Amino acid sequence: MAKPFQKCLEWVYKKFSENPAGMLITTSVIGWLLSMVAQVIAIAVNPKIKDEQKVFLIPQEFNDALVNIGAFLLITQFTKRIANHLFSTGKFAPKSVREYLNTSAKQYKGKIGNLDLNLDKVLEHANPDIKRAYTSYKEFGTTAATVGAGIFAANIVTPVLRNKMASRVQKSYINVTKSDTNKDAVKVKSPTEEIAPNNQTPKVPSPQFQALHRPQINTVSNRGSMRI
Amino acid sequence: MNIRSDYSYNYNVSMQGKPPKPIKPGDKPLDKFRKKIEQKIINLLPEKTFNDGKDKLDKCDKYGKIMSRPDSNRLIMGIPAIVIQPVIDYYNHRVDKETRVVSRNRILAKGVACTSVGVLVRGTVYQVLNKLTDVNGTKKSSTALLPKKYIDIFKNNPKKLTNYKSALSTIIALMVMTFTNFALDAPLTTYFTNRLNEKSAKKMKEKEVLYG
């Protein structure tokens, strides 16, 4: 029992101890898809929601997952990269790091803010206080930017886009339903007139048909005691 | 040795980016285009220097830790969802009023249900994982979730330990979520949605009676 479990833990170490970032993105996507499936099933089996609303809510949930995944990859990940590069290239830096770069001005002249410069390597052997200041600001800045971009992507971009997509699906469903009811209405023929196929002259109803469907006139009943 | 200079407090590795890479002649066209866009955006922003007093750095560490913890991160992402998304759905005039009300109620119910379950699940996994992956712990269970072969490597390389914990917690959370999505999130969402719909229907009837 212990050996297979240890083997699993060793597999996690071998695969992800160097760089878990790719796996974290994949698991986020899987999590979103699982949540979408659960919510779609919940909507479909809920008897208290009408069909016209289900036709909006199910595509809404489906598109919510897709747009969330797209927005996560395009907006959140991109913002994270930019925030990380701003600190790693020295564009945004704490005071002690700025002074360190200025004392080595010749070495880093013209490189600040350039993707060529990677302060993670430059400060590897620097003073621990400088390293601490750099790491603290870089990690805080990158985390704050990632969270902010995530909030914007998930709560502004995603709802607006998914509502637009789901509304179209509901509209086409309503149009299809309306055209079906119109077709059914056309099939009902009036008793006095028949729709003539192929532009032929309309048939006149037979005398028996007319007699059956003649509107009833109230006959005068023999009331009172008058005898004729 | 100043531990902070060696490894990150940041529990959530997914919030940290990769180091910058310059444009090289052998880059693929898409990579070149991406790096050019990144460089242009970086060039647009002015240089900024931050005050790095001890209190500022302690605040950065404190708030960064709060934002990167799985449970507090879920709460930070969940609260705007509960506040903003129902409003967007209610004012979606592409659909009729009844659908808008039901959509608003469902999104509100989903936000409350999923956020509360998410915070609970992630918080529990985080606490349990921290207790069972403590390389410096004295109890027998302190290293229960660490591969015994590599415990010494973790003691000397905190970054690998952070990466390992992040990966393992994500795998465990995904396994738990597979169950909770169907067993807790969806039923709770349905329950809250139906309750909110009943209340909305009552209010609409009252308005009809009052105003005709």
Image (cartoon, coloured by chain):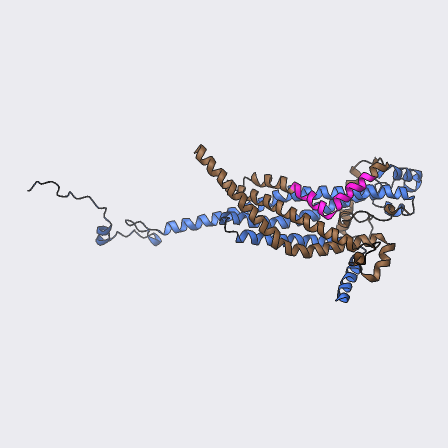
Q: Is residue B65 a member of the stretch shown in magenta?
A: yes
Compared with B86, A20 (above or below) is below
Q: Foreground residue, B30 or A129?
A: A129
Q: Main secondary structure of the magenta part?
A: helix
In this view, B166 is above or below A127 = below
B74, A116: nearer the viewer: B74
Percent position (x, y) of residue B19? Answer: 82, 48
What percent of the width, then of the height, locates residue B29?
76, 51
Q: Give the colour in which the image draws chain A.
A: blue
Q: Which chain is brown?
A: B
Image location of residue B160, percent across then percent down? 82, 54
Left or right, residue A28 beside residue A196: right
Identify the residue shown where x is 77% and y is 66%. Answer: A3
- Residues A46 and A188: in front is A46
Q: Quadrant of the N terminus of chain A?
A: bottom right
Segment tinted magenta in the rendering: B58-80
**Front residue (pair B77, A54):** B77
Answer left or right for A15 relative to A212: right
Residue A133 visible in the snapshot: yes
A172 in magenta: no
Residue B37 seen in the current view: no
Left or right side of A143 for A169 = left
Q: Quadrant of the C terminus of chain A?
A: top left
